[in-house]
Amino acid sequence: MEVSAEQVEQAVVEFYRDPVAKSGLNTWLMQAQHSRHSWTFAWPLLDPRKPEEVQFFAGNTVYMKVSRYWHEVPKEEYEPLKIKILNLIAQYSNSKVVLNRLVKSLGAYVIHTIQHDWTTAIQDIITMFDPGTVPGIEPSTALNLLFSILTIIPEELETMQEAMSINSKDKQVITAAVRNSHQSVLSLISQVMQAAQISNVIKEVVLKTLNAWLKLSLPLSETRDLLVALIPYSNYALLCEPVMEALRTAVTDVGTYNIPNTVMDFVTQMLRLRPVLEEAQHANDENTASLVYSLFTSVVECHSRLLLQCALQAEHQATVVQVVALLLQCAATPGQYPTDETTSNIPFAVWFTIQDDIMTFEGEQQAELLQLFQPVYLKLVDTFIQKSLLPPDNALSAEEKEMFRCYRQDICDTYMYAYYVLRGDMLSHLEVHLKDAVVKMQSDPTDWRYLEAVLHAYSSVAETVAETDNFYVPRFIQSIPQIPFSDNIQLISVALTTLGAYADWLNYHQDHMHHVIPLMVEGLVNASLVGAASQALRDLTLECPLTISPFSQPILTSCQRALEQSRLDSAETERIMTIISRVLSVGKDQPTIMTYLNATLTPYISRLSQLKDLMGSGLSREQHNELVSLLKLLSCMSRHLNLNNTAVEEDDDEDGTTRRHSQAVSGGPQPLLLVLQQLMPLLSAIASKASTDQEVIEALCKLLKNSISTLVDDCVAILPAILEIIPQLYEASLNPAILDLVKQLVILFGREGSQEANMGVLLRMVTTTTLSRASTDLWAHTDAVHGCLALLTASFKKTPNLVSAHHNHVAPLFHLGVEALKLPEEGTVRSAGHFLSSFILLSRDASIGCLQPVVAHNTETLLRTLMFCICNSPRHSLSSFSDVLSALCKMYGDDLTRTFKTVQADESFLSPRVTAQHKEEFAKKVLKNRGSKRRILEAVTDLALIGRGLAGTDYGAQTRGFH
Amino acid sequence: MPTNARRRAIGAFRTQRRQPPAAAVVVVSPLGRRTHQRRTPRAASAMTYQLYRNTTLGNTLQESLDELIQIQQISPNLALRVLLQFDRAINQALATKVRTKISFKASKLNTYRFCDNVWTFLMSDVEFKEVQDFAQVDKLKIVACDGRGEDTRQR
């Protein structure tokens, strides 16, 4: 289109004036900007007499054209273009907005020409904008302008790969060309920084320029003197941040790893920042202090190994010790985090890095380092105990509380790292703190926060010490009964949580169990402590199934009382049910277990029965939630009440499914089976009344699934009831949780003579229902399709006899799989892919003859669907399509060759992006690589990129691994 | 999944180098049954890994970009810039904003490998615990990369 400057000016003015026409004008203006005419219309619009928005648009157009459309500029136009831009920069030296665009244009120009055409660009620019010689511009403006240009050039280098379509090889060459001029820039910066008459505002710009150039990886040996000379400037508020930024960029540069001596020398020089820090602390200037601490944190994070090596050398040890001391001082910043200070969190990462690197040293060197850092980490533990003290109630707002929680979490992690360095010394140190805290608590029960912080530290290292410590942990555990908790709920909760964390250790130290059980058992019957106590006991029963057995009586009694007395929430009740089930699972005879279960479960089962009766007239929201909670409670019991749990014999199938001998050790049936036999009529009644209630179905299926996992073969006794419930539920709701349950049953009983027929009927019911209900609207039943195809895939692998027994279902199921490939959900497509692959791979098996004709008759439909999906479906499913194609290739290579020819002949298929030649190439690649899944996936990816118009683009190349 | 506190909703974790324990470090005890995850310290500068592209968020973004390119609303170059910005933003956010500690215990560690500085763990029957909340999953895959900054790792 022909575009004139007048038209553009009018459009820009209208764009800002008329909100209705905005969208249309935007499109037009963008097209105009991208057209070749923009080289012509932009210049006359860069006129100060034009409206500002028009000038800005023109400036932006110049930048876009120079950066992205450089290939449109003929070589003879390079010089005139440069002169135009330079003149405009001089003209707009006082107009910040348009000037920025023009400076960026010059930056882009330099990047395009510095390699061959304007090799002296940097020196020329420095000369051109010399404040002493440039005509018509104030010296300070000229200086500002000069450094703005010098800043923009390295910044444009960073973005050029994406914005200017310059490849990475050219980028390296151009970067090297720009970097070659660094000496003249550094010398200029040095001169300006030393000039007393130049304002700090200008010096700030100069420092930004320095930082931009340092990012080009300039050698530290050449920049060191300049950087050291900058340290005194950090006293000025305005310059502190850019100085720190420049120091950080220089000292953390990748190139510094090759010059350790220079780095150490530089770090020693950086310690001259300590007076700046002291002054900042004196003046309560947290900002400056943070900047200095952050800088040293970066130094240690980047060079921790070098610093540790130097710590082993006498001449450098002092520097390392001083740097670490500085960070220790930062961690110990006085006051409450985050209200009084926000600096003590800065060096958290450092403590991990140091200990991690110490561990990479070996032998004597490691021992020497551990010795050197032992006092540092001990001091750190002292500091953290103080810093993690809980503030008085209501001292923090909700947001501050969350920040403090995160802070304590960081402390918690760092205790673990400290433990790796200190080992027993840390526990010994904590013991001293514990004694002090107990004494303080005894003299003043309101002073409990110190004790809480010490317990928090103990809990942080609980999993790290594991069972290896036999000296300090026992002493800590023994001291628990002596701690004067003074009924302080918060303190007891922390103590319970801490003891729960030591569950693993207690499993190996049964003789210490009696120190901890009383506190937990008492906690269970206290409404305020039941949460923490049930949590701790649950951990204990899961970790120490055998060692806890001698304490089962008091635990069971307290659990019973807790259930009777307290108003528990559902999570607490579930935890208590878990404790009961775990405790009953070890060392009890069946009558005892049943007596206890009867007493515990009767109220819940009665309530469940009442709710079932009420279901006819409709449950209230609360009643419905109660019903679901009760089912979840029983589900908890069915998962954990397993007499074979601790004496389990495992026999892994090839897919990892574990089959267990389920008969109880005592020889009698599992108590769970006896409970379920009583319960099944009630569950059947609930199922029939809530067959469309998804929440109830899911809870019920979970209960049955857990029961089957626990009972394994023993569940045959309740199988008829389960087989009655499943069709009732599935026909009414198509809930995928039911399919999960069916899958479990089919895998477990599908190969056993006595139940094989039942499983066949069950599978037939599921497939018939899915086909009749879901096939009509796959999009609405994608989860049922997903579940059904996953079930069939499992059945293909484990019980192919069941699938092939129903011949007339096979073809519709294959079609269902093919149609499911078109669905948008990744899980469903993956499931369909697995199903079709298994189907195809199994179809050549002579013993299952009914599958082969289905594949043979539908090869073209399948191939068309696959190719269509490859070009149109979300790309994360490509591997699923590729798997099906691989299976087809492997088992039906000849058929596929013929089918590819038919598909290629259909010109309208997948056009216009995918041509006949593309299809031919795709077919060749697939058929040629029939043995290689990886190569077939590559062919599929190539077709996917072609189908989306992404072939040959950087974006397409970068996202090849999308799947 | 538990609902309180910030957590990463993306199935990949940060880690440190060398040892399995790290950012989303998995520690395996001598018994080979106990595992737990720790949060890594924050990196000085977040590494821009591309592995988060293969998350729900990343996949959805790429699908959207594909679509926008096809209907010619954006150029492939712009899409690439968006994707690179996504890499930067998600690495930065996960490195600096996540403060939740979740521990987990797996009944079985099926496979583990350390290849190209990436740890991969496949485990089954896993219970996640965060304070008082629990979540049970049948299968878990952990892909753990070095959580430190790029500069630090190049040593």
Image (cartoon, coloured by chain):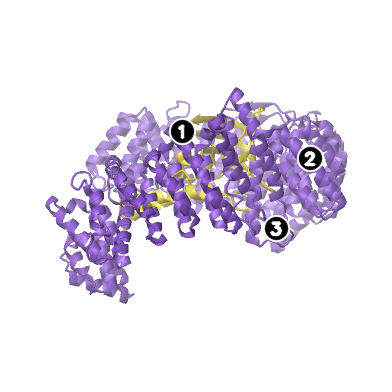
Crowding near the residue tagged with mark 3, few <14, some 14–19, many ≥20 C-alpha atoms within 10 Å? some
Q: Which element carries disc 1, helix, strand or loop?
A: helix
| Chain designation of label 1 | A
The chain letter for the residue carrying disc 3 is: A
Count neighbours of disc 1 (C-alpha within 10 A) and say few if under 14, some if 14 to 19, many if 20 or more: few
Q: Chain of mark 2?
A: A
Residue A761 shows in the view: no
- Residue A678 visible at all: yes
Whether discs 1 and 2 lie on one chain: the answer is: yes
- Residue at the location (64% across, 42% down)? A414
Q: Tag 2's secondary structure?
A: helix
Image-based side of A154 in relation to A572, left or right? left
**Residue type (three-letter) at the residue carrying disc 2:** Val
Residue denoted by label 3:
A625
**Percent x, y for residue A114?**
23, 46
Q: Residue at x 45, y 52 (%)?
A: A243
Image quarter where the N terminus of chain A lies is bottom left
As drawn, the label of residue A261 is 1
Q: Give the chain ID for the yellow colour.
A: B
Q: Residue furthest top?
A: A363
| In this rendering, position of residue A514 left or right of residue A532 | right
Residue A716 left/right relative to A102: right
Whether residue A423 sits left or right of residue A779 in the image: it is right
A958 in relation to A695, above or below: above
- Residue under numbered circle 2: A432
